[in-house]
Image (tube, rainbow, N blue to C red):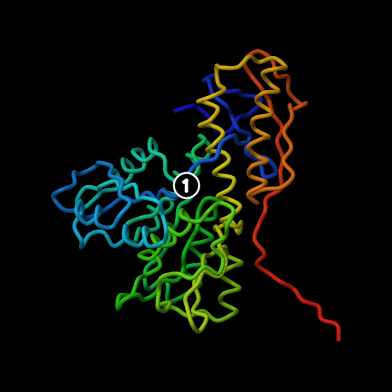
Amino acid sequence: MAQGGSWDPTDLPIEPGLYLNFVEAAAAAIKGGTRGTVAIPLLKYGANATVKQFYTVSKEKEAQDLFGADNIASIRLVLMGGAKDVLVYTMPASPTPEDYVDMRDAFDARPFNVFVFDQEADASEQDMTKAWVERNRTEGKHFLFVAGGTADDDADPAVGNARSTRLKHDYVANLIVGGTLSGKTYSSAEYAPYLAGLIAGTAINKSITYTQVALEDVNKRLTPTQVRDALKAGSLVLIHDGEKVKVVTGLVTSGQKIRVIRARQAISTDITETAADSYIGKIDNNPDGQAALISAIKAYLERMEASNVLMAPVVMLDPEFDSVGDSVYLLISFAHVDSIERIFLTINV
């Protein structure tokens, strides 16, 4: 895997790689790719699967044959949500905190787009998962974590909002409402895999706002005031609008839009992969080589612009640093494209 991640001009990394200075106004990318993989640590499974192993499944029948029909509720929800596939890691029976550490370390070496727990996870594991997400982000690996709570948590939206505050991060989404489907009631943690699948399966130039989900009703109908409070807290909220259950607004716990964050993640991931394949160690660091690199990045960003992911991309050598030797410093800027979610009308009669 190519080295990458954040860089500090006072402490430059020595490993070969293309390093991103990921700031709010700038990110770099070269090549797009297919998204849609959700990672799950599976707690129960049949004799056809081995402990502490990875399995990739894209169909419910595959999962049923591997893990047993009674053990794949979370996988089934991920696929229902629209994910391309599920990367499953089989946990030991009665897992300890150390087993969860081993699980996260194992996932470090695997590519995926969204992480979610198989069942309800306690606050300590959620906190450690948030720290794991942040560590991966600084090391150049980008994915979302979708959290949820127990049925008791869901009964009081203030509890779910407090969880959003505790897990505040650009790369964490926190569902605070569950619901009923085919006679079964899911807590928000139990239903989080569906939202993970929905997020992973939605194109990066689309929003999950107002998307209908596979529920007949929610397990807690929030008042308009409670919905507003939840959105202010950065919570992911489901409502029943009288006909269907839908996502109110696609938010991460920092209050940023999921669409915007996933675009940033995709761009940051793509540049590392493509730089390793086509540029690192393969082109000269002279005006011609630098122009080729700039042209390739700009061409990709312009393709992203044409797909309504971003607007007005600019790519140039960073004038603050000298691009000499084996180092190239680029200055990249663009504006994100969001979805229209609020319409304000002034009607003169």
Place of residue 166 in the rendered image (x, y in percent of width and height, measured from the top left): 50, 58
What percent of the width, then of the height, locates residue 119?
32, 60
Q: Residue at x 60, y 79 (%)?
A: 225
Secondary structure type for disc 1: loop
Q: Is residue 304 above or below residue 236?
A: above
- Residue beneath the point at 50% across and 25% down: 277
Give the position of the N terminus as an image quadrant. top left
Location of residue 175 with respect to 310 vertically, above or below: below
Q: Amino acid at mark 1?
A: Arg
Mark 1 — residue? 35
**Is 125 situated left or right of 25 in this image?**
left
Figure check: 142 above or below 189: above
Q: Residue at x 68, y 34 (%)?
A: 298
| Nearer to the camera, 36 or 99 | 36
Coordinates of residue 152 in the picture (x, y in percent): 38, 73
Q: How many marks?
A: 1
- Report whether 110 appears left or right of 343: left
